[in-house]
Image: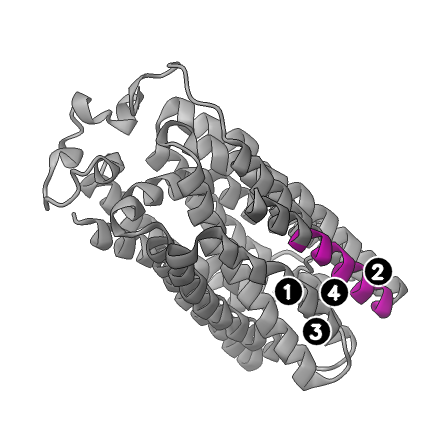
Amino acid sequence: MRPWRFVMTFGVVSLLMDFVYEGARSVTGPLLAHLGASAVVVGVVTGAGEAAALGLRLVSGPLADRTRRFWTWTIAGYALTALAVPFLGLTGALWAACALVVAERVGKAVRSPAKDTLLSHATAATGRGRGFAVHEAMDQVGALLGPLTVAAILAVSHDDYAPALGVLALPGAAALVLLVWLRARVPDPVAYEEGKGEAENGEAENGSAENGSAENGKAENGEVGAVRPRLPRAFWTYAVFTATTLTGFATFGVLSYHLVERDLLPTAAVPVLYAAAMAADAVAALATGWLYDRWGARVLAVLPLLSAAVPALAFTDTVWLVVLGALVWGGAVGVQEATLRATVADLVPVGRRATAYGIFAGVMGGAALAGGALTGALYDVSVPALIATVAAIQAAALALLSVQDRT
């Protein structure tokens, strides 16, 4: 399978799974509010979910590198998400809903370092920025369809979450079937990065020892346990920059809580707005991915600017400004999901890449938890204070990036 076909097929898998979990995330705020949660609870739970999705990669990333079972970790993580989401619509207890929100994010933590490592091999042949950007854009097709489907079912069922989230089991099952098929076709995508991926049925498919078959437990350049290079200083600098940015980044859970608590939009319309934000995510991912291949990491300067604009727009009582703020939020997520992953792939050598993705995500997870709790708490106290605090944090992030570029 050629590199672009691999990226596109993996993109279909991600499209189907985004259909599932983005459909659920589009109504997390309203669902928790329906069960009695306050803004602080919504902020902490959604922040904790992001922290779990990112922080637990500190464990899953190194384990994926050590075991070399990248496909196994990827399939297991997707399976956990596919199971958690349908049950979320069935629960009537706040604590259970909170646990399932976090469990769905744990599934992302389990799969992401391994999945990104598999993709990083193919994007070595397609172009890092373009490859990850196209994959992210395909993600967002699912992220568009999932919320719209949930919105339609909520409207028909008079805000009944059980059928709205239960239907998401179907694309989840389809994604798992396609993923198992893709693993059978390309058991060892590292061949792409070694320059062997152009043949339709090259050596990567036969799992030979010289290609370092991942499922046989071989390291890409020797046995498991071989000495691996240290993570470069530039990697740590970008990790600090990203953490600073996310510390001042609101979760959509808090944004959607604001929408329903201030009666700005009906519950069924919130997933529609989330779908629009995911469309903005796809556009931003494609644009910044293309620019990244031309200009490098300097394109990340747009991230603090977008993040600072989100609360200034989204936490007003004017509907069109709130909608604009949600679209800006989606654009910022697109930069995070595509360009930051490409940066890590360029900074870190193959043998340490899953570990690097895990560490990078762990740093991001702690920042996401702080950001969710901070925005939720400040929202209850003072929206102007929230806007000013986030602006100050993003200014600090921009200064960090500027220092890195000069060095």
- CA separation, marks 2 and 4? 18 Å
- CA separation, marks 2 and 3? 14 Å
Whether residue 204 is situated above or below residue 156 in the rendered picture: above
Q: Which residue is mark 3?
A: 314
Q: Nearer the viewer, mark 4 or mark 1?
A: 1
Q: Position of residue 388 (x, y in %)?
A: 81, 64
Q: Amino acid at mark 2?
A: Leu
Q: Quadrant of residue 320?
A: bottom right
Q: Is residue 395 magenta?
A: yes
Of the numbered discs 2 and 3, the one sitting upstream in the chain is 3
Q: Is residue 285 left or right of residue 7?
A: right
Q: Nearer the viewer, residue 353 or 25?
A: 353
Where are the magenta residues, as a range? 383-398
The quadrant the C terminus occupies is top right
Of the numbered discs 4 and 1, the one sitting upstream in the chain is 4
Q: Position of residue 106 (x, y in %)?
A: 55, 42
Q: Nearer the viewer, mark 3 or mark 4?
A: 3
Q: Amino acid at mark 3?
A: Ala
| Residue 199 visible in the displayed image | yes
Q: Which residue is mark 4?
A: 33
Q: Position of residue 91 (x, y in %)?
A: 64, 56
| Residue 111 visible in the displayed image | no
Q: Which residue is mark 2?
A: 378
* Proximity of marks 1 and 3: CB atoms separated by less than 8 Å: no
Disc 2, SS? helix
Disc 3 crowd, CA 10 A, few/some/many (<14, 14-19, 20+): many
Disc assigned to residue 305: 1
Query: Residue at position x 49%, y 51% from top?
Result: 297
- CA separation, marks 4 and 1? 30 Å
Disc 2 crowd, CA 10 A, few/some/many (<14, 14-19, 20+): some
